[in-house]
Image (tube, rainbow, N blue to C red):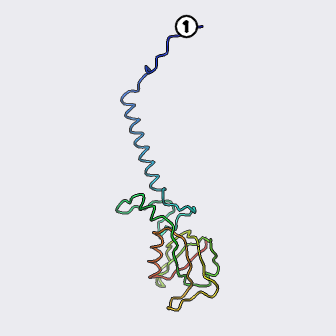
């Protein structure tokens, strides 16, 4: 058997202080970037794989986080992104007859005749459509009422838009 010097554990070459500092800085930067990516992507996509219908007009792109003046906790963000059922009265009953539960639609709001329509929700899933003949209510509101599944924040935007605009849908 050849003669080898004994192996002594723990006597290897230690990294210099500069290398340790660089490792710590790199680890901190990696942790911050991971947290940033989690904040951008985490909790903003519903389980059904859509962008959540959170588009609200010009400049919005799916997957881009918008910052408000205050940061919200993870629980509050999760509650805002949780899907809810929202009733929407569509101005044209003939358009509603083309829909069936499970369809994906973009919901648009149009103000006065001179204003362009704005997108209130994108990729919303249709949950319920009216039966044949259930298109006009007796209180003067014309159109058909459908139910769409959207995040809670988008449902609030839909309710606000419906109060001041006529609503329409486009099939995705």
Residue at coordinates 47% horizontally, 82% vertically from top-left?
Answer: 165
| Residue 91 shows in the view | yes
Of residues 96 and 18, the one drawn nearer to the viewer in this rendering: 96
Residues 108 and 144: in front is 144
Q: Up-down: is 70 above or below 4?
A: below
> Which quarter of the rendering shows the C terminus?
bottom right
**Relative to 40, 92 lies left or right:** right
Please count the marks in the image: 1
Q: Quadrant of the N terminus?
A: top right
Q: Is residue 57 visible?
A: no
Residue 29 sits in quarter? top left
Q: Work out whether 138 lies above or below 101.
A: below
Q: Position of residue 89 (x, y in %)?
A: 53, 82
**Residue 60, position in %: x, y?**
48, 65
- Residue at position x 49%, y 80% in the image: 110
Q: Nearer the viewer, residue 110 or 140?
A: 140
Percent from the top left, x then y, of residue 11? 43, 19
x then y, percent, for residue 22: 39, 35
Residue 70 image-quadrant placement: bottom left
* Residue drawn at the location 52% of the way across and 78% of the way down: 87
Residue at 51 percent across and 75 percent down: it is 86
Toward the viewer: 87 or 17? 87
Instruction: Answer few, some or many: residues within 10 Å of disc 1's Cα (few below 14, many 20 plus, some between 14 and 19).
Output: few
Dot 1: element: loop
Q: From this view, report whether residue 119 is shown above or below residue 69.
A: below
Q: Which residue has dot 1 on it?
A: 3
In the depicted structure, whether residue 85 falls above or below residue 93: above
């Amino acid at each position: 058997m050849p003669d080898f010097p004994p192996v002594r554990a723990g006597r290897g070459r230690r990294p210099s202080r500069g290398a340790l500092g660089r490792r710590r800085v790199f680890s901190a930067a990696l942790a911050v970037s991971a947290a940033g990516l989690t904040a951008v992507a985490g909790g903003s996509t519903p389980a059904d794989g859509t962008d959540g219908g959170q588009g609200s007009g010009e400049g919005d792109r799916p997957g881009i986080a918008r910052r408000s003046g205050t940061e919200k906790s993870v629980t509050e963000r999760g509650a805002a992104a949780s899907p809810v059922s929202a009733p929407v009265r569509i101005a044209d009953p003939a358009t509603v007859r083309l829909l069936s539960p499970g369809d994906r639609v973009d919901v648009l709001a149009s103000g006065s005749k001179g204003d362009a329509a704005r997108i209130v929700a994108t990729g919303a899933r249709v949950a319920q459509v009216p039966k044949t003949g259930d298109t006009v209510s007796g209180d003067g509101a014309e159109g058909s009422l459908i139910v769409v599944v959207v995040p809670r924040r988008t449902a609030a935007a839909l309710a606000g838009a419906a109060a001041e605009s006529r609503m329409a849908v486009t099939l995705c």
